[in-house]
Image (spheres, rainbow, N blue to C red):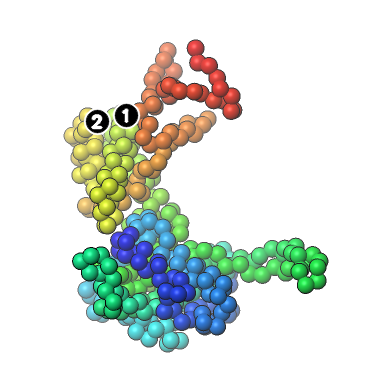
Amino acid sequence: MTEKEIAEIRRRFRADKSNISHVCGCFVNEKKEIISEFDQSLGMMPEDDAEAMLKILKKTLSGAPGRNLLDIEFSTQQVLESEEHKLLSELRGTQLKDNELVHRLYDKIIHTYETDGGYLILLAYDAYDVFAINADGEKDTESSKVFNYFLCSVCPARAGKATLSYYLPGKCFRTVAADTVLGAPELGFMFPAFDDRSANIYGALYYTKKLNDSHEATVDALFRSELPLPAATQKETFAQILEETAGEDCNMMLVRTVHSQICNMLEEHKAEKIEEPPVLTKEDVGEMLRYTGVPEEKVEKFAERYDEEFGKDARLNPKNIADAKTISVKTPEMTLKVSAGNGSVLQTKVIDGVKYILIRADGEVEVNGVNVHIS
């Protein structure tokens, strides 16, 4: 799904936009036991509570495609024959009203999701009247189709703290008892995917809050589908491959150039307003390495290691590889961050046998808030 398609569904999660009539779910304790279940009408909830519930569900569609939001792809065989796709389709078809099907979904999550403490599994079904967009970019007066989908959110729950509060009717302070506080979703998904403003039963959209943990066991139980490496792992793996294959050529200039080229890719992608997420291939990186003078045999070695670690001809999201805002330099004694556009101020040099990181200082220099003179 593109950012535009995700944003269109996110806008649904408002009381005046959504066709979600109720939410259902269960509370799971630290022993993986369901200790409470609920099926609550949004219409019967106070307006503020309903808005808060929709806001939590909406967070399952937050973050960046390719980082927090990952496309799940089902094979034709899965769609026709698999147990996992059949369950998702039946949950959608019954609008989450079949208790046996709902419990089968609960079981898949409970048996594979690992966390400290209790959590809630929230489910919501929505029917979206998708209005056609005419040549002028405006909505037609009547919807052309209905997109039926459901959303699943897994939210940690923690005990709240007792709080001193002013009790207005009694004109006094009193302690409000602690209660369970619902946190933002750790993971979740939407089925089916919303591609080209239509339902795509060959896809789903998966959400993970942590860039270093995609909860692979839960993904496998729900979809029997492999995800790309977590975003944080992609960055670490890419850096390791670059360091190993470039060897002595892995210097400040090389790393700065690769970072700069990736940032340029992101800027061009944004400027051209391309809806599909940006991609980075081993061929792209190969050209960057050649540009800095890395020998061809090392470029080929990089391509081999790339295929080994990421999969043959894998396409990465460049946002997972390079921070478009900063360049970070670390030594055992310090961490230095420079805005990405000013990477050229950094140099390395050996003076009298000692290695130095040099930073060009053209303007004012402050140390602990004090302007210092460099003579």
Residue occupying image coordinates x 35% and y 28%: 344
Q: Which mark is residue 202?
A: none
Q: Quadrant of residue 194?
A: bottom left
> Where does residue 341 sit, x and y in percent of width and height?
36, 35
Q: Which mark is residue 253?
A: 1
Name the element at disc 2: loop
Residue occupying image coordinates x 40% and y 66%: 10
> Where does residue 93 sit, x and y in percent of width and height?
34, 84
Q: Is residue 111 visible?
A: no
Q: Is residue 306 left or right of residue 17?
A: left
Residue occupying image coordinates x 52% and y 63%: 184
Farthest residue, direction left: 296
Front one among 128 and 87: 128
Contact between marks 1 and 2 (CB within 8 A): the answer is yes
Counting other residues with Cα less than 10 Å from the Cα at mark 2, is it few (<14), some (14-19), or many (20 or more)? some
Amino acid type of disc 2?
A: Thr
Q: Which residue is mark 2?
A: 292
Residue occupying image coordinates x 24% and y 37%: 288
Rounded to the nearest angstrom, the CA distance separating label 1 from label 2 is 8 Å
